[in-house]
Image (tube, helix red, strand yellow):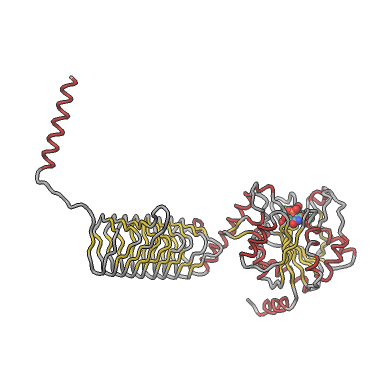
């Protein structure tokens, strides 16, 4: 950041700021039981994205206006760790009416008040800071506009030269006004000391009989207050009203995340096929092959390699560890430095010590594996007895032969060796070999004689039919 920008930011930070997030709408077009603003993008509810963005712009306080599903919204926001006050809007009578629900917060007297929508999850701090900068420069209202491909349905920003004159809602616009392509993105910044007066003057004499926040612009004009519109990239103000738009928002968010990780030094040869969660943490120098899905709470350290088609959630992947292809790591999977979980393996609630390897076709659940142990193909920890989960403990340098079933609770101590195909039900002490399978019986020449016998029988049946 340049020196000049820094100074601006510092100046902005010395102004008090309230962000009001409107989140009372039902969102019927989502066809969902979940309140609209709780639908996730990158696994995080949309309204929480907006709250986090507000926080990153020097907002001191956040007020959220809730209505439909208010308890759920309140709970989700609180769980996310964001601090906000909640204001109830029982009936949705328009955006100005919604802002008025937070009137007690506004009346505390902030320099800047940002009004944001809870269903606009892709908003970025730079856009909000640019709007606040206009307030700092003397505007009493700054509207964040954008130029969509299709302006249908949006409020139009009517300008006279550089000056914003009015916002005309689509339904109230004249044919000439409908031709304007510069639209209201829904984000508005106000001089907090004037907002109350503006709200008091807003009526509902319009096509929708709603209290439009957008009317504040014309009112401000009549009072001689300076107004300004700025332009934001279309992606920033994408509003989500349907699941189609939700999927579009998700795609844009994923794209941003991929670029973030690429810039941070994570390698991906097909980033467009890798899906992140909002809390995914990956260090520079990690390598991701195509088609990987990250669920919640995953950390990946430098030098780790995740190979194609892996599904990973609640897992920690240590330095230089290797995962996949086709691996499934479930919550509680802890892979230490240089360990390996290979193809068609599932690991859940289990730690894999340094240098230990689980290379193929294995299920390890509720287990602790020490260092440099080798778990053969087809090994299963039988952790569930139909009612309870039990623990398997495997020490250092243990060798588990292929196709073994480890019936938990069970412990294999350091340097133990398990013969292939064993069903291990009792603890195995250090340096011991355990094998539990039927003895092999070998009969010389018997295969040949058996084959002759069955072929003779086949011939006999054929002759009987003729
Ligand atoms: C609004 C703007 C329009 C802009 C568009 C951008 C107004 C009058 N119009 O129109 O200029 O182009 O957004 O997407 O502001 N809400 C409440 N309580 C209410 C009404 C709305 O909480 O009583 C919330 C909704 O849940 C939603 C947001 O405010 O999150 C916007 O409301 P909505 O009715 O969708 O406004 P638009 O008609 O889309
Ligand atoms: Ca809308």
* Residue 319 visible to the viewer: yes
Choose between 247 and 149: the one closer to the eye. Answer: 247
Looking at the picture, how far across and down is residue 311, in whole percent? Answer: 45, 57
The answer to whether residue 183 is seen in the rendering is no
Q: Residue furthest front?
A: 387
Residue 204 position, x and y percent, is 86, 53
- Looking at the image, the residue that sits furthest to the left is 444
Residue drawn at x 84%, y 48% is: 207
Q: Quadrant of residue 14?
A: bottom right
Seen at 33% across and 70% down, the residue is 371
| Quadrant the C terminus occupies | top left
Q: Determine whether, in the image, residue 127 is placed left or right of residue 42.
A: right
Instruction: Pinpoint residue 206: horizontal percent, then vertical percent.
Output: 85, 51
Which picture quadrant has residue 351?
A: bottom left
On the image, the x and y values in percent for residue 388 come to 42, 57
Seen from the viewer's position, the closer of residues 62 and 154 is 62
Give left or right: position of 223 versus 461: right
Q: Is residue 292 left or right of residue 66?
A: left
Viewer-nearest residue: 322 or 3: 322
Tell me the quadrant of the picture where the N terminus can be found.
Answer: bottom right
Decide if residue 254 is on the left or right side of residue 395.
right
């Amino acid at each position: 950041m340049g020196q000049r920008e820094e100074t601006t930011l510092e100046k902005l930070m010395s102004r008090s700021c309230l962000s009001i997030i409107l989140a009372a709408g039902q969102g019927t077009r989502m066809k969902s039981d979940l309140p609209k603003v709780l639908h996730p993008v990158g696994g995080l509810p949309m309204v929480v994205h907006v709250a986090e963005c507000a926080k990153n712009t020097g907002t001191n306080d956040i007020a959220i206006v809730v209505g439909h599903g208010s308890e759920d919204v309140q709970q989700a926001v609180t769980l996310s760790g964001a601090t906000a006050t909640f204001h109830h809007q029982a009936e949705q009578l328009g955006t100005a009416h919604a802002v008025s629900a937070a009137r007690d917060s506004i009346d505390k007297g902030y320099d800047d008040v940002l009004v944001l929508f809870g269903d606009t999850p892709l908003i970025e701090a730079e856009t909000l800071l640019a709007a606040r900068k206009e307030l700092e420069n003397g505007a009493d209202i700054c509207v964040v506009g954008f130029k969509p491909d299709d302006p249908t349905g949006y409020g139009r920003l009517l300008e006279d030269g550089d000056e914003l004159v009015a916002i005309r809602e689509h339904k109230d616009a004249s044919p000439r006004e409908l031709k304007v392509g510069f639209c209201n993105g829904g984000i508005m910044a106000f001089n907090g000391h004037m907002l109350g007066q503006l709200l008091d003057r807003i009526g509902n004499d319009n096509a929708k009989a709603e209290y439009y926040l957008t009317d504040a612009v014309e009112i401000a004009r009549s009072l001689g207050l300076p107004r300004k519109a700025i332009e934001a990239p279309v992606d920033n103000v994408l509003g989500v009203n349907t699941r189609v738009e939700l999927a579009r928002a998700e795609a844009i968010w994923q794209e941003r995340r991929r670029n973030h990780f690429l810039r941070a030094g994570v390698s991906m040869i097909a980033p467009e096929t890798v899906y992140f969660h909002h809390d995914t943490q990956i260090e520079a120098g990690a390598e991701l092959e195509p088609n990987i899905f990250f669920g919640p709470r995953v950390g990946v350290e430098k030098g780790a390699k995740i190979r194609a088609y892996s599904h990973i959630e609640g897992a920690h992947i240590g330095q230089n560890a290797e995962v996949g292809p086709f691996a499934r790591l479930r919550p509680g999977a802890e892979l230490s430095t240089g360990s390996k979980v290979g193809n068609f393996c599932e690991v859940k609630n289990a730690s894999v010590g340094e240098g230990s390897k689980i290379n193929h076709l294995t299920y390890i659940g509720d287990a602790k594996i020490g260092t440099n142990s080798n778990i053969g193909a087809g090994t299963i920890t039988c952790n569930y007895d139909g009612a309870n989960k039990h623990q398997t403990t495997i020490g250092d340098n243990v060798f588990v032969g292929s196709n073994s079933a480890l019936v938990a609770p069970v412990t294999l101590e350091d340097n133990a060796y398990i013969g292939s195909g064993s069903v291990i039900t009792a603890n195995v002490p250090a340096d011991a070999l355990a094998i539990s399978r039927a003895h092999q019986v070998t009969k010389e020449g018997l295969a040949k004689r058996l084959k002759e016998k069955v072929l003779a029988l086949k011939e006999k049946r054929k002759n009987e039919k003729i």
